[in-house]
Image: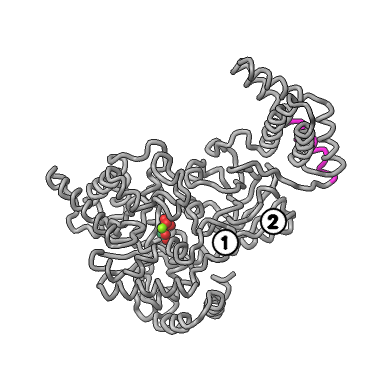
Amino acid sequence: MRVMQGIAASPGVGLGKAFLYVHERLVTPHVKIEEREVPHEVERFKRALASVATEIAQMAEATPVDNSEKIVETHLLMLHDPEFTKAVENFITTDRLCAEWAVERVLNSVIEAVEQGGDPLLRERSVDFNDIKVHLIKELMGQSHSDLSMINEEVVLVGDTLLPSQILSLNHKFIKAIALNGGGKTSHVAILAQALQIPTVVALGNITEKVRSNDQVIVDGNLGEVAVRPSVISLNKMMERHERWMEHERQLREIVDLESITPDGFKVALKANIERVEEVPLVLQSGAEGVGLFRSEFLFLKPGGADEEEQFVAYKEVLEKLGAERPVTIRTIDVGGDKIIPGMAGLGEENPILGWRAIRFTLARKDIFRTQLRAMLRASNYGKLKIMFPMISGVEELESSLTILEQVKEELRSNNLPFDEEVEVGIMIEVPSAALTADILAPKSDFFSIGTNDLIQYTIAVDRGNEKIAYLYQPFHPGVLRLIQMVVEKGGNGGVPVAMCGEMASDPLAVLILLGMGIGELSMSPHNILKIKHIIRSVAQREAKELLEKVMAMDSYLNINRYLREWMYDRFGDFFTA
Ligand code: PEP
Ligand code: MG
């Protein structure tokens, strides 16, 4: 058994056999097996050998071209060569290597030998040997087809990285949990996993090298732990912890209909972040007072994108279901960065995180922007819509966006298409330059929503999806806290309500700070709403202000983190700090 520690990215515990998916390059598992596992491992190797041989023979029949026939012949000869089979089996039985590792060892030494040998003809064949190696290892790893949408049995998906589009393409009912080498707590893969309620741990480093296909894996998305081939004892321990967490969740259900207000009367609107229309029932169950962030770009992740009518139908459905009492803030598309949408943005850039993203993309592709604004405005008749622009970095971008919005409104008026003339238009504050110029942006905005996922990334210069520097991604960095406070003050002075929709809004440790600053709206994944409401209902804003004063005088995120943890522990026991 092996227990690996990563970053908890989506809560819950999931258990099942591993489906191994390596996206970028082949990383062969190097697992030492036990003596009793030897026959099983040899059997696995033989089965993989047979199935690759059949596949290659079938491919040859389907494409009978002279040259490919020769290649195929070489491959088949190799696969049926008893010397080769014996060498692999030896590594399994004598050195106790798992089958993938044994195949790699044998074929690497064959490749090395032919490459260093004098025969140029033979040297060319090293490509063939490498092909066989990759084919066989992938077969052993259960990756003969890497189309994840084909998974049709219950598995734990273990991978290096996943694209947001891949997560969406999964048949979710079969994915018991996800464990990834890479990623960060606020990467979009983590955000989608939460939306789909799949327990997930990211930033595990090299889990793809420690797990073989079909190994039993248990993923604890609350604590960020993954146990590979768990013992009965650790399995029971994790399930016990899971039960306790479920009990917390059940207790929290009791406050679902109660107001989100501090004991001394400060009201905080708790809203939901959604990525897909299908999440609306969860939003309603959570007691959310609206949708504070609808990440509309996920409508475009499927081939062909979404035309005006499709968008209109989606927006209308969300607005109607939420009703006039619960506002829905739809953000114009934020593609690019880690949200690669083929045919749109995010591909082929040297530095996509600092590149052609969000409002920069839509201002360049006005056709897409106008179509979206038309669909949104048409839908505004069916509920309480708010429009939000992402990644605004300065007043020019805001002015250009507002001009386009005005043009679209004019167009609708002249076509006699009704829309809400009072629709509020706000911006995300997620680029440091916007935070620093919040007073300039305030007169032109109906509201601000602080996007801490990006604001932290750009303030500390730390890629939010890169596990190697995840330790630097710190919401309580004094630089981040000062920027947030500045936005709240400048927004407040300009009469602009300030909300927060980044992941920080749902961090139990951060809530006290946000309460102290006087942020009146927090938007988060629906499953987090009740725990945040519980804190708000338990702590007076007066206390939060005192705490804020202490925190803002501290010099490091380590000290702030420790202080907040202790404070929360004293007040709530291990309810939030376990
Ligand atoms: C943010 O940056 O905090 C945010 C909410 O937007 P996204 O996570 O979609 O970038
Ligand atoms: Mg953002």
| Region rendered in magenta | 35-47
Instruction: Determine if residue 572 is in view.
Output: no
Residue 412: x and y in percent read 17, 46
The secondary structure that dominates the magenta segment is: helix
Say which quarter of the image contains residue 17: top right
Q: Label 1, on which residue?
A: 469
Verify whether residue 215 appears in magenta.
Answer: no
Verify whether residue 36 appears in magenta.
Answer: yes
In the rendered structure, which disc, 2 or 1, sits on the residue that comes first in sequence? Answer: 2
| Residue drawn at point x = 38 percent, y = 70 percent | 260
Quarter placement of the C terminus: bottom right
* Vertical side of 446 occupied by 197: above or below: above
| Residue drawn at point x = 43 percent, y = 55 percent | 354
* Vertical side of 577 occupied by 169: above or below: above
The amino acid marked with disc number 1 is: Ile
SS of the residue under disc 1:
helix
Residue 126: x and y in percent read 72, 30
Instruction: Determine if residue 323 is in view.
Output: yes
Say which quarter of the image contains residue 97: top right
Mark 1 crowd level (few <14, some 14–19, many ≥20, 10 Å Cα): few
Residue that sits furthest to the right in the current view: 94
Q: Label 2, on which residue?
A: 235
The amino acid marked with disc number 2 is: Leu
Residue 334: x and y in percent read 38, 51
Judge: label 1 CB < 8 Å from ligand 1. no
- State the residue in front, 195 or 513: 513
423 left or right, relative to 454 = left
Residue 326: x and y in percent read 30, 59
